[in-house]
Amino acid sequence: MQKTTNIIHSIPVDEATGSISVPIYQTATFVQQAPGINKGYDYGRSNNPTRHALEKIVANLENGKAAFAFATGLAAIDAVLKLLSTGDEIIAVDDIYGGAYRLFTHVYQKFGIKVHYVDTTNAENVLDFINDKTKIIWLESPTNPTLKISDIKKISAIAHIKNILVVVDNTFASPVSQQPLGLGADIVIHSGTKYLGGHSDLLAGLVIVNTNELAELIKFIQNASGGILGPQDCWLLIRGIETVTLRVERQCSTALQVAQFLLQCDEVEEVFYPGLPNHLNHEIAKEQQNGLYGGVVSFSLKENTEEVATKFVTSTNYFKLAESLGGVKSLICQPSQMTHKSIPREKRLQSGIADSLIRLSCGIEEAEDLIGDIEQAFQKINSTTIIHQ
Ligand SMILES: *Cc1c(COP(=O)(O)O)cnc(C)c1O
């Protein structure tokens, strides 16, 4: 069975009615025959049939033992962090998602959890930070917004010698291009807000695990902390997942064409895209992402100022200026002024996020239209530069 067939037929037909769409069980509680005797559901936080269907579909998507749905990607990350205890340490990819950095630093640090930020593009770098307290190695590959790649297989092999869990935030790759559990990771996280939802119309988070033991622990935390995804959004996310392969394959193909086009633009200083042969870890990306390098492309400008980048991001028509990524409509963002504004400039520059860096999330529009949009935006900024002179 091929992957799209597998996804479509992992979505159950309702046994009670034959409904081909998963019913939305909009209920807080379930009537019981006698105390503790029920039809498998007792209270909406603990479980809900719509959520249960979604969780099974997502477990299948990532080839995991079980999956758990949360209100947002950050709620999913938060649930995994609650596996830890005071004194435990994390080794995390150095240009980690800003929201994860904020949660680690401003919430979990005060509970005595220490995080070492490491350049994991070279797998061996983690060795310098592993000690008896290390419990988790936290990866993203590709990263945001400079699309750095880490070797998940190699790092998992290093981690498992010391019984360290490997967590991969797989949001940027999506399960269509990369399945970290098969590469050795123990836990996968998604912001379902991005490619899985795919339409920029919901927020959701997912945790997928590869053992029954981890499943029990995360299930307990999900119920104990309560950050679940509501039934309406579970349904909407299932609806998004139905087309995820089609969308992501199209987005990856477009992003590659956009990246190749940007390479030839006089105004562009550097293009960041794992699908380009000159990308630092292109060969690793090729192998672990099945040749699908994602829908996000970033680039910096020769005229390396925030002002010129702002002119560019306000000059596109199809690329809408907004945070987030992965949806059917193309988005553009200026990390220095938006997603990464809270990071001090020096630290931001160190992670390769130049003042003029621009991040594109390619949607499902035709590549030629998106390339045309970039061309006309360059013409606009070039002509306004001349007027100012
Ligand atoms: C967006 C995002 C998150 C957070 O997800 P939310 O649904 O916005 O809470 C986490 N990790 C990555 C890589 C993301 O892009």
Image (cartoon, helix red, strand yellow):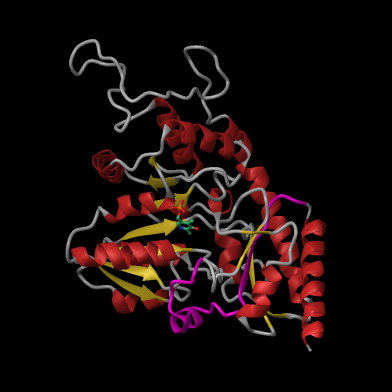
The quadrant of the picture occupied by the C terminus is bottom right
Q: Position of residue 17 (x, y in %)?
A: 51, 12
**Quadrant of residue 253 in the image?**
bottom right
Q: Most prominent secondary structure in the magenta stretch?
A: loop
Q: Is residue 362 magenta?
A: yes
Q: Answer left or right for 90 relative to 72.
A: left
Residue 26 lies, with reference to residue 264, above or below; the image says above
* Residue at x 30%, y 41% (from the top left corner): 222
Q: Position of residue 237 (x, y in %)?
A: 52, 38
Q: Position of residue 236 (x, y in %)?
A: 53, 35
- Pick out the residue farthest to the bottom: 389
Query: Viewer-proximal residue, 64 or 43?
Result: 43
**Quadrant of residue 332 in the image?**
bottom right
* Residue at x 61%, y 44% (from the top left corner): 199
- Counting the numbered discs, the total is 0
* Residue at x 67%, y 68% (from the top left corner): 313
The quadrant of the picture occupied by the N terminus is top right
Query: Viewer-proximal residue, 248 or 382?
Result: 382
**Can residue 247 be seen at all in this image of the molecule?**
yes
Q: Is residue 101 magenta?
A: no
Q: Which residues are magenta?
A: 339-365
Q: Position of residue 2 (x, y in %)?
A: 62, 39
**Can residue 271 be seen at all in this image of the molecule?**
no
